[in-house]
Amino acid sequence: MLSVPIFTTQSVKNDVLSGITVSLALVPEAVAFAFVASVDPMVGLYAAFIVGLITAVMGGRPGMISGATGAMAVVMVSLVVEHGVQYLFAAILFTGVIQIGAGVFRLGKFIRMVPHPVMIGFVNGLAIVIFLAQLGQFQAPDADGNMTWLVGEQMYLMMGLVLLTMAIIFFLPKLTTAVPASLVAIVSVTGLVIGMDLETRTVVDFVRGMSGDPAATLAGSLPTFAFPDVPLTLETLRIILPYSIILAAIGLIESLLTLTVIDEMTNTRGRGNQECVGQGLANMTCSVFGAMGGCAMIGQSMININSGGRGRLSGITAALTLLAFILFASTYIEMIPLAALVGVMFMVVIGTFEWTTFKLARKVPKSDFIAILLVTAVTVAFDLAVAVFVGVIYCALVFAWHHAKHIEARIQEHDGHKIYHLNGPIFFSSVSNFLELFHVEDDPDDVIIDFVDARVADHSAIEAIETLADRYHREGKVLHLRHLSPECIKLLHNAGSLVEVNVFEDPTYKVASDKLG
């Protein structure tokens, strides 16, 4: 399952520097998502470390970054509020078990069923969500603790530092690619703020504002092992299992779609089933070390890829550096201006959004463009999992509607027989068109339907064949079928069919092959 990575001096340097850059961006994200889930900030930071490390080692996509995510946090909050954080840890344990099961039973292959318009809508929606999430950094708590927009010099300074960060990231690669531009931007802007004693919000201000504790800090210790403290009863299982199923689905969908996006960016191929197992192991470990669990993070993954991180070492470095920050260097991380991190994330937004979307309106079918807009809107309004399900269902219905029209018959008369040579798929959406092809009253006593160029796809098609056979039977005529699959013939016989089936040269249909994980 694991392959031995091949290191070069250049790849090690790129992965290490990129990993350090990513770790800086992980801190505010992990803290923010912890508060979304109504848990302590350290629960989110521990999750970023544990999930990031285990998926970097065991996952199926080198270079992909995982950690605590907002998509999962919004599901967790109701469980934590109603039952407490220990029930969350128990739910995360079962989430991991479900995800490992998905990998073992090779369900990762089904991500291939996500249409390309849904993928475009997915990345566009996430880009918008990432952008909107950064707008909160342009707010600060007032005397009453309410968040208000920055005004005057504070707003101008914040915007100036954000633009400076973005400019460094944009222009530095044109001069040199020796070090990641994002890391240089964060260090440079932090040095400028400290050197000029500029009054702007930093990471520690963000932590204290979120917690309401003026003495809050990122300093912590190593997570400790403790099995979730919940009653081992069926009632506990009833409470946590629905959450576990939803969290597992969201985590795998976001992770596998992120994997697919990185595959396209790097022209390589990750292993979906192995990623399912890696995510499951990471979440199970989180549950027994007091962490909130997580999945792949497209924003941080984009930072990593754009900074040159391609191997497992980048994810490992990000996780270990984050732990080092928590244990030894929290003071230095707390000094980083939020403006620098916002600038990095804005560049991620620019790089993630598919700007060619606006040109696609004239180049692709309207149904595909509607799918892009639909998935983008649902991702922003609800969450990723709902958006993907809606997009896939929409595309499937559009596909079914269009292919329902592609059933036709070529008619041939031979020795008193009438032969219908069918062409096209017969399934739930096309059965009405299929039945309209035949003229029962005007046909001779013997009618042959040849399925050599047709496909009987589902039970609705079987029922349509039965209906047609019954119509001919009532007219005292015999219907013959040729080139049906063995499965269809068996179903017809089991149903006590009135159809006479001529079996010769019948094809054996192959639905799918899964040679790769």
Image (spheres, rainbow, N blue to C red):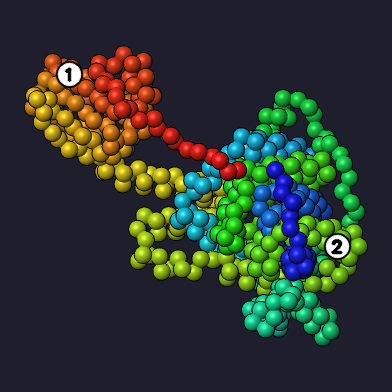
Assign the C terminus to one quadrant of the image: top right
> Crowding near pointer 1: few (<14 within 10 Å), some, many (20+)?
some
**Amino acid at pointer 1:** Val
Q: Residue at x 70, y 36 (%)?
A: 97
In this image, 437 relative to 108: left or right?
left
Residue 275 percent across, percent down from the top left: 66, 46
Distance Cα–Cα, label 2 vs label 1? 80 Å
The residue under the point 87% across, 64% down is: 330
Toward the viewer: 121 or 410? 410
Q: Nearer the viewer, residue 457 or 66?
A: 457
- Numbered disc in front, either 2 or 1: 1
Give residue 300's position: percent from left, percent from top. Answer: 68, 62
Q: Is residue 428 visible?
A: no
What residue lies at 72% left-to-right and 46% top-to-bottom? Answer: 2
Secondary structure category for the residue under label 1: strand
- Quarter occupied by residue 106: top right
